[in-house]
Amino acid sequence: MSKPTVHIIGSGISGLRCAEMLLEFGLEVKIYEKSEKIGGRMRTDLVDGFLLDRGFHVMQTGYPHSKSKIDFKALDARSFNPGARIVNIAGGKPRISTYADPFRRPLSSLRLLGAERWSDLIGMAKMRISLSRMDIKNTFNQGDASTYEYLRSFGLSDSFIDRLLRPLFAGIFLESKLDTSERLFRFIFSSMSKGDMVLPRDGVAAYPNYLAKSIGFERISLSTSAHADDPVTINIGGHRKIVDQVVVAHTPPSEEKLMRGVWTVYFDSPRSPFPGKFLLLNGDYEIGKNAIAHMAVPSDVQPSYAPEGRSLVVATIVGDAADSLNLSNGKEIESRARKEIEQWFPDCENWNTLDVQYISAALPSHGAGTDLSYSKSFDENGIIYCGDHIAHATMQGAINSAESAAKEAIRRILT
Ligand SMILES: Cc1cc2nc3c(=O)[nH]c(=O)nc-3n(C[C@H](O)[C@H](O)[C@H](O)COP(=O)(O)OP(=O)(O)OC[C@H]3O[C@@H](n4cnc5c(N)ncnc54)[C@H](O)[C@@H]3O)c2cc1C
């Protein structure tokens, strides 16, 4: 007798993780992916010998799933330095300072600068202590304020938030006001203080590819759009088929419109403009005034990201910052990015633009008051769903929802 088969729509990280669990349990799976490649938002393209992840994207070794399930050695992953550099214009000149490790050693790393107010140093230390006492799984259990309100509750000043935490978290949440739920902030800050930001040798697509290989590429149909008519009916190009169970592993198109967008500008530079494997935060970041939240040089971390003797430089412009400056196409974004970068690195005139990308549906919006303690894995019609949109806007959120969806599919097939 053939094994019951679960039909999964979408080959992003949630669809793949769901398939992996179902196979481990002894069921069969079939995956349908509407695009020509697997991986969903974890995609990497090869352009002129450079590896371009779709948007600046890292993997976090501090996530619970990373710790228990991902073999970072097999991905040959390498880490960014845990701190950040901050660039700001003072007296008409760029000034770059280094925060060695604001996540693990906030007091010592910030004191090195000698520029912060004591109340900010103490506020960071208090926040760090409060989060280090919390089990990472409990970071979602309480509080409905925004990230900004949460930071202010520790006595952090606006100038401190604007210099360090706003450009950093604007680039993570893909919104600049820090309206995102404090629960997500706590989870990400805790993960960053317990692990590293890493890049696999073959780009972020390496992880979905690794999963797909273990699942078996023969189980995945590419360039195949599918739809669930009900929990056990799959519809492919108008052909309806009754199956054992369907799992929808993508954001519904109606919700995609509400997602946050991001622009990314990729440059080929003859050398690294800020060596040291740090993220470079825009210390003057202000919505309506400037565009770039942060920059990175992925090839400093993972030399495979650029051909020998070249550097890949990536600038991130959050959708709301672009909108506030009325930047609406790739040409305007590139020209604005170059204008801002020129103040910090005048030799950027020697950089070639490799690509300018816009992802309109990059991350689901999880504002203050959003209950992120995910529990339900099916909709009002009983169709099983998974994806970061129903958990939280991270790889871990996508994985959590996938595991719940797999358990629900198993429960239904067994009963
Ligand atoms: C620029 C950017 C940076 C990010 N940075 C980080 C980070 O640093 N750390 C982190 O943890 N997370 C990050 N994320 C978030 C992370 O990438 C996502 O949470 C995760 O990839 C979501 O996976 P998913 O499976 O839920 O959805 P998706 O990856 O969107 O997968 C859904 C898949 O379903 C397919 N599909 C849709 N409709 C159909 C259909 N009708 N039929 C068949 N197939 C269909 C799509 O083509 C897609 O392949 C980032 C995201 C972006 C965009």
Image (tube, grey):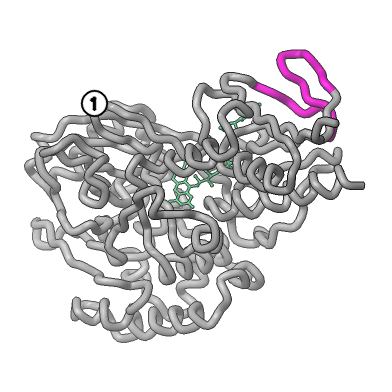
403 relative to 188, above or below: above
Q: Give whichever of 98, 27 is nearer the camera.
A: 27
Q: Give whichever of 267, 10 is nearer the camera.
A: 10
Three-letter amino acid code at the position of disc 1: Asp
- Highlighted range, magenta: 225-241
- Residue at position x 26%, y 77% in the image: 109
Is residue 405 visible in the rendered structure shown here?
no
| Quarter location, residue 181 | bottom right
- Residue at position x 53%, y 66% in the image: 187
How many numbered markers are drawn?
1
Residue 141: % across, % down: 66, 71
Whether residue 415 sits left or right of residue 316 in the image: it is right
Q: Give the class, few, some or many, for how many residues have Cα within 10 Å of label 1's Cα (few <14, many ≥20).
A: few
Question: Where is mark 1, residue-wise?
Answer: 48
176 relative to 26, above or below: below
Label 1 beta carbon less than 8 Å to ligand 1: no
Q: Quarter for ligand 1? A: top right
Whether residue 399 sits left or right of residue 240 in the image: it is left
Is residue 206 visible in the rendered structure shown here?
yes
Residue 344 lies in the magenta-colored region: no
Q: Give whichever of 293, 133 is nearer the camera.
A: 133
Q: Give whichever of 406, 166 is nearer the camera.
A: 406
**What is the chief secondary structure element of the magenta stretch?**
strand
Whether residue 102 sits left or right of residue 41 in the image: it is left
Residue 21: % across, % down: 67, 48
Q: Please, what secondary structure does the residue beneath circle 1 have? A: loop
Residue 213: % across, % down: 52, 36
- Residue at position x 69%, y 42% in the image: 23
Q: Residue furthest front?
A: 1
Q: Residue furthest top?
A: 238
